[in-house]
Structure formats: C-alpha cells, structure tokens
Image (cartoon, grey):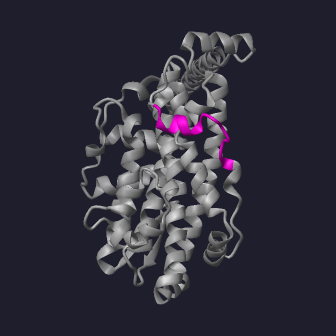
Amino acid sequence: MRQRKNIWRMAALLTAAVSAANLCLTEAKAMPVTEENILALLDEYDPDGAYILRESFSRRENVLGWFEKENDILADIDTAVHEETHRYTFRSHSLKQEDIYIGGQQHICVKYTNVFDSTEMSGEIPEELRTSRFDTYIGSPEQNLASNIDGIYGLLNEFNAYSWGMNTTVSLYDCYWSAAESPLDWDGYILQSCNDRQAYGDFNYYILKYLLYAQKHHPDIYRDIIANESFREAYQITEGRYRALIAKWEQQTAEIMERCHIEKASAYLFDDQYRRLINEISKPEYRAVYRLLCGTDMPDMRGTVQESDNAAEAANDSILMTANNVKTYNTITNDKDTDGGQDWWRSLLIIGGIVAGAVIFVLILTAIDNTWTDKMNSRTCK
C-alpha cells in the first residue's frame, strides 16, 4: 500500500503545482484582503515581505488596517510591508537600539549613540533639494517622529522601510502582468515603485547630509556614529540592496514602456526630484563620507536618472495615466501579435500544456495502479 500512496501523492503534488501557477492570474485583481490571502501571495512572490508581515500577524498587530480596499491586496501591499518593517525595527527601541531587517529572516541590531534632532540641519538643505518629503521628515516633523528625534538612526529606519516596500512591489512584477487587463492597471506599480525610488534619493541624501552636518557642528557625535560598526554594516547592506532594486526596477519599467506603449514621462514619475538628489550625493564631500561608512567608493548612480524635458512636468502631473499616454489593452495585444510576441497565446498554450500533461500523467498512474492491484489480488498466501 505504501507504493500506491506514493503514486497518488506525486499526482496530488503535480496537480497542486498546476493550480498554484494560476493563483495570481485568477485572484490578484479581486483577492479579498485577509491574512491568509496576503501571506499566500507574498509566500509565492516575496518571502521577505511575508516574513515581515507574518511577524506582525503573530503579535496580533492590525496589519489589515493598512489596506483601504477590501478586495485589492496589490493596492496597499507596499504600504503594509513598509509600515510593518517599522514595527519590526522598533521591537527593541526601548533598549536604545533598533533591529534593521536585512533579508533572509535576519536583522542587524544597531546600537544607538548620541544624536541631535534631524530638523537641526534643515537650514542647510537648499530649496531645490526640498522634495515632498522634506517637511514631513526634516522641516517640520510631527512630535516624537523617529526620523527626527532618533537622528541618523531614525533616518536609517525610514530608509530601510522604504527599501522593503519597494522590494515587495518589484517582486510582484510578474503578478502585475498576469493581473493586468489594461495599461491603466500599471498605475499602482508605477506610482508605488517611483515613490520608493525617490525615497532612496531622499533618505540617502539625508543620512549623508546628517553626517556632514555633524562633522562640522557636532564632532563628538560624528565620531561616535562613524565608529558604530553596527550602523555602518546596516547602512551598507541596506543601501546596496536598495540600489540593486532600482536597477531591477529600471529593467522592468523598460519592458512596461515597450510592451504597453507608455511614454517615459508617465513611467518615470518624480524623476526631476530624484535626479537632483542623485547629482547632489555624487559630489566629492558626500562620496568621502560614503567611503568612511562602507569602505568602498560610492557607485555612480547618475546612470539611473532619465534625462527628459518632460521629467519635471511629469512629477507635478496627475499620478494616474491618461488615454493620451497609453493604448487600449486590445491594441497592445494586436501590436504584440504583429511583432511576433504573441505572449498571451503563448501563456495560454503553456498553461494548457501543463494541465494536459497532468491529466495524462494521472491517467498513466491510474493504469499502473490498476495493474498492480490486479496482480496483488491474484496472489495467494502460502
């Protein structure tokens, strides 16, 4: 009987694999926002996001409160992972330290040293570098906001949270493709990922600027931060992973623009602000501080900005794409067919082939099982 059980176990596993392949295709657009569905989606596409949210669910945190729509997980999953990363980070805050999640279910415990409020350096941030985040985090933050009162450690906390939010959006790229029925379905991906991309520029600039300001006005604080090995390690890992995410996002966005005929200005939101920040931290004084933190030269991020006359205009335009910037889904499908892509039909044939193969495999197993059973029934005990 053990052989029979193994045969049908194999058949069950194959059938389950075929069903899982269609999970996002059939449910992502109208998936009820429940703990089970959120974790199932993230387990499939973003294990780190799943780990962060599972930690919060296990502590009975109100994770579902971040979702504004009852039947659209994709709309707010980036925000949920971002905010719950903060909860994870604050687990040991009362001990004057923070747990910076670095992936693979691992974190770095960053010990706090003396700091000054981040708002103190606001006067040295020029007007052209004051993006939409400036007032919230630096210029006039709310009372007890960590990015202010925890100084550079609060800024690292925010930097890390934005990076994991972006990681979730980028990881769900294939899910967006399978769920999209029109180019407008990419609005969420584009808005979330561009917002997170700009946050890389904002908080990397704030962290390096904080150190430059400390070096000039608070040399003792500056020396303690630079000597803080846990901070240096956490920053180096977070910044490097965030930078790699942006490179991956650029590849994904290039594909979206090509296949959906979306103009650059509609795909690279906030690009003018991002470009100014990247150009600023590419200056020698920031690169010198980066070298102290990471022990290596700062990679040149200026290749990740899009020179465009429409960039600044795009940053101030409506977030949602209009019909002037996109084509209908039927037109896109026809264009792909004309170009020989035929991606939709190829996907359908692949799924059909997998299902047909599973059915044939089960039929073969059934025949083998029946033959084996007949032989066993014909045997007699001696």
In depth, the one of 202 and 100 nearer the eye is 202
Name the quarter where the C terminus is drawn: top right
In percent of the image, x 60 and y 25: which residue is there?
262
In percent of the image, x 36 and y 29: which residue is there?
31
Task: Give residue 157's position: percent from left, percent from top.
Answer: 42, 65
Residue 216, placed above or below residue 58: below
In percent of the image, x 51 and y 56: which residue is there?
129
Q: Quadrant of residue 146?
A: bottom left
In the drawing, does residue 198 fall left or right of residue 68?
right
Q: Is residue 249 visible?
A: yes
In depth, the one of 93 and 360 nearer the eye is 93
In percent of the image, x 57 and y 18: which residue is there?
359
Residue 144, placed above or below residue 247: below
Task: Give residue 26's position: percent from left, percent from top.
Answer: 45, 23
Residue 175, placed above or below residue 138: above
Q: Is residue 6 visible?
A: no
Residue 334, placed above or below residue 207: above
Tag count:
0
Which stretch did the figure color magenta? 304-317
Task: Give residue 218's position: percent from left, percent from top.
Answer: 46, 85
- Whether 191 is among the magenta residues is no
- Whether 312 is among the magenta residues is yes
